[in-house]
Amino acid sequence: MVSTLLTLRAAQIAGYGTEQGVDLWLARKARSRGLPLWALETVGRQIEALGAGGEAAQVASLVEVVELIERNEAEPYFRSMLDAWRRGDAEELDRLMREEATSEAMAPMLAELLDRRNREMVDTIVAALQPGKRPFIAVGAGHFGGAKGLLAMFADKGFRIRQVEDKAE
């Protein structure tokens, strides 16, 4: 949790706050329209994923965050992530996230945070889909890219994937 809090603080110092998050905006919009909301996972599951890999992964994660801050690389890192997000570049987001978690000790945590949770999310979403319904599902952009990302997993299950773009920009 310390690593997560430091990451959030580093992002905030770099000018990127949680209040700017798309997930909160989408939830507010859905509530204002009376649309139902349901979670793909519990807070407990997220905490479990953050704890994967035991103490070695926790220390490695903390060291990576502290080093990112000490090297004054937090702002460029978060800017790169935001730029990739704005371009809709899921592969670049995946690369950036995995690049920051290069320590071998962090491998179990990364596998749990992204890969296993992605499989669980796909299974949950597929099980909830109903013929004739078109649900809107919001998931953090870091879960989309890579061979074990949501886009690849849905494509493997036969779903047709297309990116929605804002033509107004």
Image (spheres, helix red, strand yellow):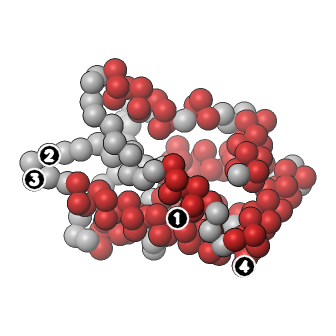
Q: Position of residue 79 (x, y in %)?
A: 68, 45
* Mark 2 surroundings within 10 Å by alpha-carbon count, few (fewer than 14), some (14 through 19), many (20 or more): few
Distance, label 2 to label 1, CA atoms, is 27 Å
* Residue at image mark 4: 104
* Residue at image mark 1: 114
Q: Which quadrant of the view contains residue 159?
A: bottom left
- Up the image or down, 138 lies above or below 16; here it is below
* Residue at image mark 3: 131
Distance, label 2 to label 3, CA atoms, is 6 Å
Residue at the (72%, 79%) spot, across then down: 104
Tag 4: amino acid: Glu
- Proximity of marks 1 and 3: CB atoms separated by less than 8 Å: no
Residue at the (47%, 69%) spot, across then down: 116
Distance, label 1 to label 3, CA atoms, is 28 Å
- Up the image or down, 139 lies above or below 103; here it is above
Tag 2: amino acid: Lys
